[in-house]
Image: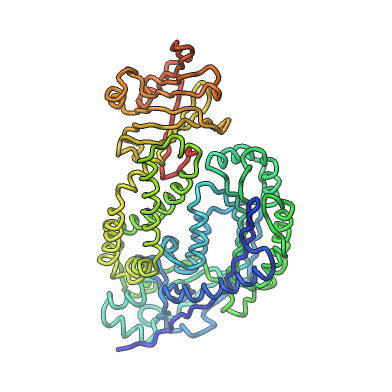
Amino acid sequence: MKYKLNKLRWVAVNLVLSTTACTTGNNVGGNSTNSLNTTNNNYLNAASTQVEKQGEIPGDVGYAFDDRTGMSKAVNCLVNAGDPSAIVLSTPKLTLDFTNTVSAADIGVLFNEGISGNADFGLFSISPAAIYTRARMLNQRTIDFNYVQTLSADATFTVKGTGSSILSADAQNILAQGNDAFTQVCGNSIILSSKKGAVLEATLTIKFANAAKKRQFEQETAGSISGIESIVSAFKKSEQTSTRGAFIGISIYQLGGDPTKTHEIFNGLVCDVDNLDSCQQIVKNLINYANNDFQTGVNFKDPSTLYTYKFKSKQYSELGLKVTLDPLTADEQAAKNYLTTSVIKDRQMLAYLNTYVKQVFFNTYVDYVTQSNVFKAITDYSSIIDYYDDIRNSTVIIDSCYDDTNNINTKCILAAKQIKIMRSKFQASIALANNLATVMDMNSPIGEIVFIPVNVVDSSVGNILNNVTGIYVAYLPKIQALSSECNIDSSTDYEYFKTYFPQYGSKSLYCVDDPSIVPGVTNFFVNGFGNRNYQGIAGHMVNSVETLYPAGPDGNIQYSYSDSSDFKYNPI
């Protein structure tokens, strides 16, 4: 039997992206009103088409919700679904803040929950909002200064009655077929309230030459950036240091309201390192737009133009209706966790490897075999990402883990297994990449040194709790230069040195230095490097004489590790 439930249609909620972003000598993005208009029209068309293809149906108050998948359903199962008076809007409230930044993760929640009700969903979605936020979450060499402005009202759906009387006749017929049949269509909750209105998100992006320069910029500007208007001046002050060779750009993303005038924010201006004054003018235009056209473009009398976000649901059981939905089992949750973790790490790693091969040390210190393996790893990771981005595969994941709640125990777990099988075909490249992303940061008497792997002996290096053995290059962040080539063994028994370098005795780090970079130092070494219970004693060789640096009871160096989970110390 077919039932006529009130199905939610996709409404293109006037989402639009405008950008201007350039680097020296290479203009990227819209540089004129015409090109921006073309981009925006294509973007709107793509939004509607992609969302319809993947079934990304935006939720709304009164509509069914599934707590297990975290997704809104495409139906309203309530008896007063078609009653406009059931939705009550509060007095709209404006929030303008160009001082405090918002994290990429929070933007992901804001955008993806607005579409689906679930932020994780955006990792697999190919909707414009998901692609936009993914780009901001996955780049380790970029700082995004995100600012969000909202004009919205609290929307509440008034439920009529209690128990089964709250349901429409068709929904009651489905309920008569049993709990599972009902929850599959109507979920176990309803979206009782939300925000409705418009969201304006602006991002000023700085992409640095490497992660070390990003870290340097953060140190140089600590406490000096007080809002979006101060960023460009901070960029100017660091032009000869951290922002040298950097990329700067501004993007605007609006959901809801009338975004047709967002192109006037740019008004033909180009923001790049050669036109920083234009960047500052765009910022001023943005603030003016937020204070004027953004607000006047929101019509709360036209629901089709309003963006719905920040859902709050209420279970049917709290409304007197006996409907249950068991929580995810450990295996089901593990499957979803594996999928979300894998897609993030694999995207990050591909970006890292593409940057790794562009480093100065790659052709100098990395041997031919390792170079070949790195290029193969890039090809393999590209295949992995292509698999995720293939609409057929992403749709399978979405349908299995986020669509039908009854599929999670079978199809979602199977989807995770399929991803594991797919990734297992590239295990050698994944292990190599994890190894090359594992670096050590050491504070020593001659300053901070970062050790970057160029040839890894131990196949388990990717786990920072395991031994770290191999050949590394030493990078000095202070002068931004490579200083030496090092043999490293951080195992507590120094097995690597015993086997391969018995002449070094108990030394577990030995670097051959470039005297022109570190005057007077021809070799740098650490006795006991890697022993977690002892920080080690460092020394150097001058004219073949070994000299220890002054040491306290805990040695004279301190070191820490960073891997692909955060890339914290990686200077690439």
Compared with 468, 83 (above or below) is below
**220 and 369: which one is in front?**
369
Residue 251 image position (x, y, % from top left): 61, 60
Residue 387 image position (x, y, % from top left): 36, 62
Q: How many marks?
A: 0
Residue 557 image position (x, y, % from top left): 45, 23
- Residue 318 in sight here: no
Quarter where residue 38 is shown:
bottom right
Q: Residue at x 35, y 32 (%)?
A: 470
Compared with 525, 195 (above or below) is below
- Colour pattern: rainbow
Q: Is residue 375 left or right of residue 522?
A: left
- Residue 155 in sight here: yes
Q: Is residue 115 left or right of residue 489?
A: right
Compared with 564, 186 (above or below) is below
Quarter where residue 167 is shown:
bottom left
The image quadrant where one finds the N terminus is bottom left
**265 and 553: which one is in front?**
265
Q: Residue at x 46, y 39 (%)?
A: 363
